Image (cartoon, grey):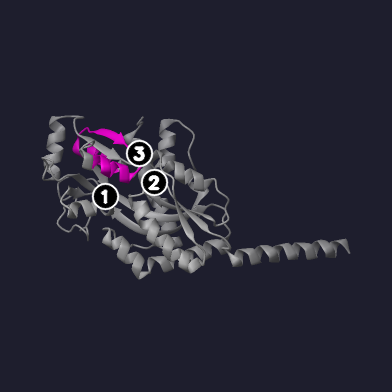
Amino acid sequence: MIRRFLLAAGLAAAAGLAAAQAAYPTKPVTMVVPFPPGGLADIVARPVAEAMARELGQPVVIENKGGAGGGIGMAQVAKSAPDGYTLLMALSSYSVLPEADEVLGRPQMYAYSALRPIARFTADPTVLAVRADAPWKTVKDFVEDAKKRPGAINFGSSGNYGTMHVPMEILNQVAGIRQTHIPYTGAGPAVVALLGGQVDALSTGPATVLQHVKAGKIRVLGHWGTGTLASMPEVPSMKQAGYDAEYAQWSGLFVPAGTPDAVVQRLRAAARAAANDARVKDVILGAGSPVLYQDTPDFERYVQNDVKRMSDVVKKIGKVQ
């Protein structure tokens, strides 16, 4: 009798859990953007959240949580309950920060294993942006001036080892130059600093500066990609300019590890629908970044390879305080 009771109770509990997962979501979902408004992660997250909300039947609310090159927001999601109600729209700094913590000899803000990839939405090379009234017209002009005045040129970023810092350090290494790094809490504040003259240059996603380029306030000298930028076809790559520097800034959706598979599949379907949504494509493309979607299996492999590649880059950069 007791055995039958326990078996029945276990089956009932399992059925209840399955029903709860099948019903997901039953309340609003939070999408953490680990940067302030105005950067690539925020630009991508807002239309994606709206489209996913339509698919899920619940609001998907954006929470901007900037700081530490995205590490604070990523750590928050990594420590969240694995129930599908806290999502992360990360940038490629995800692949860098735990390795940077190791290099600096400090506790990791999060472990790679604490977050599970769901979908990639964009993957753009960053661009070298300066003010329109800057004296440099080409990457060569910029590099030659930096060689003449080591440390005199300063650049803004979203934080140490972040997606705006790493590509500049790669350029420094291959070109044999030294610049002064000034970290901010995100791409938005860094762009404001560039426009205001507090910094001389920055490396960022095309979407972050395209509107200022069109307005004649910012000039783009080159990009860290291998092909042609759809939004700026006239801009040469670093390799075309003579510098073997390459870097891609991607944006992707993650959940805490341990999130039930049934919930992951629901989110995966909603992310896929968002990536195919015409309004999402128009908004992101209008900002300068075409949607380059990867579903979960491909994105998982992409992230694994990116982590391996960027760990070598971080070790070469070394300690940055």
Split into 4 quadrants, where in the image is the C terminus?
Answer: top left
In 3D space, how far apart are the residues under numbered discs 3 and 2 (Cα atoms)? 10 Å
Q: CA distance from mark 2 to mark 1?
A: 17 Å
Residue located beneath label 2 in the image: 35
Q: Depth check: 242 or 150 in front?
A: 150
Judging depth in this view, the residue of 174 and 233 nearest the camera is 233
| Residue 289 in picture, x, y percent from top left | 29, 58
In the image, taking residue 270 as reference, residue 226 lies left or right, namely: left
Reading the image, the residue beneath label 3 is 159
Query: Element type at marker 3?
Result: loop
Q: Amino acid at mark 2?
A: Phe
Q: Residues within 10 Å of mark 2 (few under 14, many from 20)?
A: many
Of circles 2 and 1, the one toward us is 2
SS for dot 2: loop
Chain part drawn in magenta: 167-194
Q: Residues within 10 Å of mark 3 (few under 14, many from 20)?
A: many
- Residue 246 drawn at (x, y percent): 26, 48
| Mark 1 residue type | Thr
Q: Mark 1 or mark 3, which is nearer the start of the sequence?
A: 1
Question: In terms of sequence position, does the residue under pointer 3 or pointer 2 come before the other?
Answer: 2
Q: How many marks?
A: 3
